Each structure stands twice: as C-alpha cells, then as structure tokens.
C-alpha cells in the first residue's frame, strides 16, 4: 500500500527470523523435489496486529539470506476503493463486511502469475488519496511470495500459513498510530465483523505468533484446501 506507516520493532524482527529459518529449509526441500518451486507464505491477523511489519521484516531477512522475496498486501484487493468503502458499507448496514469484500479472482490471478514467473498487473492502494493505482511486477525475480492481510490464510496453495493471535481490542494503539482508517463507531462495527471472519481461518495456521510475538507450532493445522480454491469462492 502506498503511503502506509510501519511500526517495526525488535519483536517483529525476532519473529521474522524464526519464520525465515523454516521458509528457507522448506524452500530448499521443495526445490529439490520440484525444480523451480515458488514458495508462498501467508500471514493473517486482525487490524493492528503487525501483519505488514512482520511481512516486511520477513522479506528483509529472506533477502539477507540470499532468497528473493516479494510482498503482496491483500488490503490492495478490496473491490471497493477506501474513498468509497464507508458509503458502500452503510448502504447495506455493514452486512457484507468481511472476506467477500476481496476481489479473490484478481488475487488468484496475480498468485498464478507468481507461480508461473510472469509479469503481473497488480492493484496498489494509495492511502492518502484513497484510490487504487496499478503497478507492474516481474515475478520471475522472486523465489518467495509473502502474502499478508486480514484473510490471507484463505489462500489454498500457501506453503506456510502464519496467524498472529491478537485481537483488534489489544491493538488499538497501533491502529491509531498507523492512522489507516478513522476510529469511530462505524470502524468498531467493521472490526467486530472482521474479527469473526479472520478467526475462522486460525485453524489453517502452521505457525502461531503469540501476544508476546513468540512463534510456536500450531497443534493441528487444518487442510487449507477445504471449500474451494480460495476463501472467496
């Protein structure tokens, strides 16, 4: 997202180092089995939980280790631009807030471009103007795609799923500091609706990032292949 504010701290860097170690080991193993395998990490969590900070820190760590990363923010894939989103939500009394707001077909297409080493035309939200721009990415220069966003764990073919186990109530300070959306009564309704959809994906996680940003294995990660290819289908 253009104009986004990141609040990176040592906890994000430390968690990213743990995740990067696993990514590198699995990537090397998969590339031995399937030459040229392209690896996808999906990072989900509620608003203000540190998804963007963790994905950035992970990408920096991977690059340092000689792995070519690319970050994909799923906040860029809302069907409705930020400048029009509140009016759209008010029109149906917030009934459709949640996973269905993403353009999953476009997200799926861009991920397919990554898998196939193609150039791709991708959306990029300008936070200041509230409009959606377009940018061209050459995925042939990336080994790992780091996908972060509220519903990133809805991606079926992610090799590694990471869930940040913090609720929006615990991250109010970060939400205010980043200033992406106004903190008003409408926003609170959105956060409550998002909470239900996001937490529904927790079972798909391979790794859980806790309240203190420690990284642990999920006890029993579920099959990300249930109910269609992507969450929006």
Image: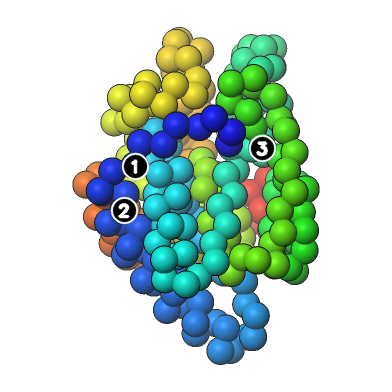
Earlier-in-chain disc, 3 versus 2 = 2
Residue 109 % position (x, y): 76, 54
Instruction: Give the distance between the C-alpha atoms of the residues marked 3 and 2, in whole angstroms.
Output: 25 Å
Q: What colour scheme does the image use?
A: rainbow
Residue 209 % position (x, y): 32, 52
Q: Mark 2 sits on what residue?
A: 13
Q: Secondary structure at mark 2?
A: helix
Q: Which quadrant would residue 218 be assigned to in this image?
A: bottom left
Q: Residue at x 55, y 82 (%)?
A: 30
Q: Quadrant of the N terminus?
A: top right
Q: Mark 1 sits on what residue?
A: 8
User: Residue placed farthest to the bottom in the image?
Assistant: 32
Earlier-in-chain disc, 1 versus 2 = 1
Residue 180 % position (x, y): 49, 24
Horizontally, is 208 left or right of 127 in the view?
left
Depth check, front residue: 1 or 159: 1
Earlier-in-chain disc, 3 versus 1 = 1
Q: Could you classify mark 2 by the number of other residues whose Cα lies within 10 Å: few (under 14), some (14-19), or many (20 or more)?
A: many
Q: Secondary structure at mark 3?
A: strand
Q: Could you classify mark 3 by the number of other residues whose Cα lies within 10 Å: few (under 14), some (14-19), or many (20 or more)?
A: some
Compared with residue 4, is residue 111 higher up or lower down, i.e. above or below?
A: below
Horizontally, is 158 left or right of 77 in the view?
left
Instruction: Give the distance between the C-alpha atoms of the residues marked 3 and 1, in whole angstroms.
Output: 21 Å
Q: Mark 3 sits on what residue?
A: 124
Depth check, front residue: 142 or 226: 142
Q: Could you classify mark 1 by the number of other residues whose Cα lies within 10 Å: few (under 14), some (14-19), or many (20 or more)?
A: some
- Label total for image: 3
* Residue 52: assigned label: none
Instruction: Give the distance between the C-alpha atoms of the residues marked 1 and 2, in whole angstroms.
Output: 8 Å
Q: Are marks 1 and 2 in contact (CB under 8 Å)?
A: yes
């Amino acid at each position: 997202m253009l104009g986004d504010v990141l609040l990176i701290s040592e906890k994000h860097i430390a968690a990213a180092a743990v995740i990067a170690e696993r990514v590198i080991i699995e990537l090397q193993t998969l590339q031995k089995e399937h030459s040229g395998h392209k690896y996808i990490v999906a990072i989900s969590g509620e608003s203000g939980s540190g998804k963007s900070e963790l994905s950035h820190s992970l990408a920096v760590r991977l690059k340092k280790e000689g792995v070519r990363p690319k970050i994909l923010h799923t906040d860029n894939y809302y069907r409705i631009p930020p400048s029009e989103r509140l009016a759209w939500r008010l029109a149906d009394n917030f009934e459709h807030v949640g996973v269905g707001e993403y353009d999953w077909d476009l997200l799926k297409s861009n991920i397919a471009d990554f898998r196939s080493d193609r150039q791709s035309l991708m959306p990029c939200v300008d936070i200041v103007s509230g409009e959606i721009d377009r940018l061209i990415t050459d995925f042939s220069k990336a080994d790992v795609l780091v996908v972060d966003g509220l519903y990133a764990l809805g991606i079926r073919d992610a090799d590694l799923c990471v869930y940040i186990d913090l609720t929006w109530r615990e991250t109010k300070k970060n939400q205010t500091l980043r200033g992406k959306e106004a903190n008003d009564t409408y926003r609170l309704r959105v956060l409550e609706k998002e909470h239900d959809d996001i937490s529904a994906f927790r079972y798909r996680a391979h790794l859980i990032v806790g309240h203190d940003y420690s990284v642990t294995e999920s006890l029993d990660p579920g099959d990300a292949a249930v109910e269609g290819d992507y969450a929006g289908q």
